[in-house]
Image (cartoon, rainbow, N blue to C red):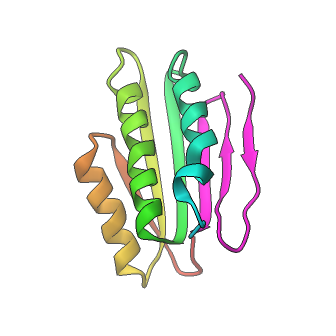
């Protein structure tokens, strides 16, 4: 299984998915077509779920995401929740947000209540 690396743009986040169990999504997510943009991420997660690491660490550093991206992000967490439910497997999410950005904190909190994965919320003064 290969590493998936997608560099960030003004409208799309950086995505770095490593089969060693470290997953990172960072930046703004306002693509023209969210489903198409996140397709490779979903495909990678399906493949990864066949033989996940004992611990999968996920870092989310969103500056902003639009409504269509929020659905794709939820789908990512649903894939991760399936991994977390596997015997001997654990998923940990670190949700980074600007200290002053209550909306981004609330978004992460909403995701954490929908999917049963442990979230750690990390506020930063300088941003995600």
Which quadrant holds residue 44?
A: top right
Give the side of residue 100 with respect to residue 27, left or right: left
Displayed quadrant of residue 31: bottom right
Q: Residue at x 75, y 27 (%)?
A: 2
Q: Is residue 41 left or right of residue 2?
A: left
Q: Position of residue 9 (x, y in %)?
A: 73, 68
Q: Position of residue 78 (x, y in %)?
A: 36, 39
Q: Residue 45 in magenta? A: no
Task: Establish if 125 lies above or below 41.
Answer: below
User: Within the magenta stretch, is there residue 12?
Assistant: yes
Q: Quadrant of residue 8?
A: bottom right
- Point out the stretch of residues depicted in magenta: 1-29
Q: Position of residue 75 (x, y in %)?
A: 40, 44
Viewer-closest of 11 and 100:
11
Q: Residue at x 61, y 38 (%)?
A: 22
Position of residue 87 relative to residue 48, above or below, is above
Q: Residue 46, percent across and down?
A: 52, 27
Name the residue nearer the viewer: 85 or 9.
9
Residue at 45 percent across and 52 percent down: it is 72
Q: Quadrant of the C terminus?
A: bottom right
Give the total number of marks visible in the rendering: 0
Up/down of 113 relative to 1, above or below: below
């Amino acid at each position: 299984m290969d590493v998936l690396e997608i560099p960030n743009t003004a409208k799309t986040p950086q995505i770095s998915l490593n089969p060693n169990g470290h997953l990172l999504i960072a930046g703004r997510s306002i693509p023209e077509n969210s489903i198409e943009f996140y397709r490779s991420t979903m495909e990678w997660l399906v493949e990864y779920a066949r033989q996940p690491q004992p611990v999968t660490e996920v870092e989310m550093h969103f500056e902003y995401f639009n409504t269509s991206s929020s659905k794709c992000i939820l789908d990512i967490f649903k894939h991760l929740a399936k991994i977390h439910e596997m015997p001997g497997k654990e998923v940990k999410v670190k949700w980074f947000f600007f200290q002053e950005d209550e909306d981004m904190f609330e978004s992460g909190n909403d995701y954490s209540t929908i999917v049963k994965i442990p979230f750690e919320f990390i506020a930063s003064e300088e941003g995600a």
